[in-house]
Image: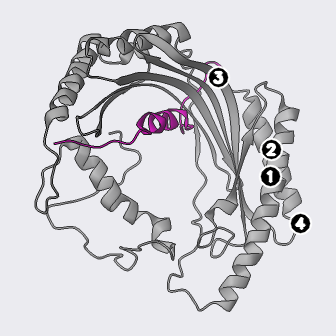
Amino acid sequence: MKKLFGNSALVCVLAIFLKPALYGSPAGDAGKNDVLIAAMQQELHRAQSDLGKLDPAPYFISYSVYDQDSAMVVGSQGSLINSIHARRRSADVIVRVGTAALDNTHEENRGSALSSGSLPLDDDSDATAHVLWQLTYGEYRKASQTYLNVKTTTQVHAQEEDTSPDFSQEAPQSHADNQDLSPAPDHQILEEIARRYSAYFRKYPYIYSSNVVLAAQTMRSRFVSTEGSHVVSSGAWVRLAIEAETRADDGMELMRVETFQAENPSHLPAEAEITARMEKMASDLKALRSAPVAEPFDGPALLSGRAAAVFFHEVLGHRLEGHRQRGEQEGQTFTKKVNQQVLPDFLSVTDDPTHAP
């Protein structure tokens, strides 16, 4: 069976790698005297006090700060075609105006609650507070205007069937993971790995294009809110993606991609295992070049473990997301199915974010 992949497959892989993660941290920058946390809490209290005097006043404000050390290298045909090493601090500021029952995020206005920006890399509390102040007051202006529009819209439109609140109020959480992580992987090691693996496909003349993308990141995330929550979490990861592409006689583009992830490069699978996967990629592409085009089929199908997970996520997972149940432009498949059975008895689904896969 032939499978058609778009030319943007590598772009998608790079986008995943460059997207900020919600865990990770540069080593050794956290401790009992955390300058960032102190600046975040001080500015949060000031914003809560100052903005609380305005009308409309925010009922919830939170700061999330991500301190990232990232690297990405791309190799092809045994040579590097890209190599990046960057350090970045960024902040997400959330402001909710109104009440938990009705606020500025109502309906399609979820984006009005969030503003993001870059923070100084130095542990300068004044410079950090200045950026947080700018983000907070800019976000408040956006959120307050949206809230006024939401109130007007709800007053002139027919009453909505869904009367659930826009925000849930929870007990404050406190957790500080200040472990010192290993330093970010040596950039030269990442480049050497990319060169070595990317040279593997040179012996297959029918593979017209191939790339090896290696990305690594360490990050510490910090979160404070006006509810009293204070959370510091840490982690690190390295991802290896290998892509190979060929073309059938009829011009159809054919691609295979394999990915690996670990905490650091030394925890990636052994080279023998990775090259065995690459050998399988090459043999699959060779077989696909001469395979007949698959005809449309309507009937039962068996999916592999990885494919089944993605299929389940796309078909059922997204339709169970809370914000999609409230969106008037969404399918709202399960909106009126609360406390009703939606799967056969032999299937069960558990959503537990505390359980490691």
> Could you tell me how far apart the alpha carbons at marks 2 and 1 are, in whole angstroms?
6 Å
Q: Label 4 sits on what residue type?
A: Lys
Q: Earlier in the sequence, mark 3 or mark 2?
A: 3
Residue 278 appears at what percent x and percent y? Answer: 26, 20
| For residue 353, side relative to residue 206 (left or right) | right
Q: Which residue is mark 3?
A: 86
Q: Secondary structure at mark 1?
A: helix
Q: Which residue is mark 4?
A: 53
Residue 2 falls in image quadrant: top left
- Does the CB distance between marks 4 and 3 fall below 8 Å? no
The image's mark for residue 322 is none
> Could you tell me how far apart the alpha carbons at marks 1 and 4 are, in whole angstroms?
15 Å
| For residue 47, side relative to residue 154 (left or right) | right
Q: Nearer the viewer, mark 4 or mark 3?
A: 3
> Could you tell me how far apart the alpha carbons at marks 3 and 1 are, in whole angstroms?
26 Å
> Could you tell me how far apart the alpha carbons at marks 3 and 2 are, in whole angstroms?
22 Å
Q: Farthest residue to the left: give it.
A: 300
Please give the range of residues in magenta: 1-29
> Could you tell me how far apart the alpha carbons at marks 2 and 4 are, in whole angstroms?
19 Å
- Does the CB distance between marks 2 and 1 fall below 8 Å? yes
Instruction: Please state the total of marks drawn on the protein image.
Output: 4
Q: Which residue is mark 2?
A: 132
Q: Nearer the viewer, mark 3 or mark 2?
A: 3
Q: Earlier in the sequence, mark 1 or mark 4?
A: 4
Q: Label 3 sits on what residue type?
A: Ala
Residue 235 appears at what percent x and percent y? Answer: 51, 29
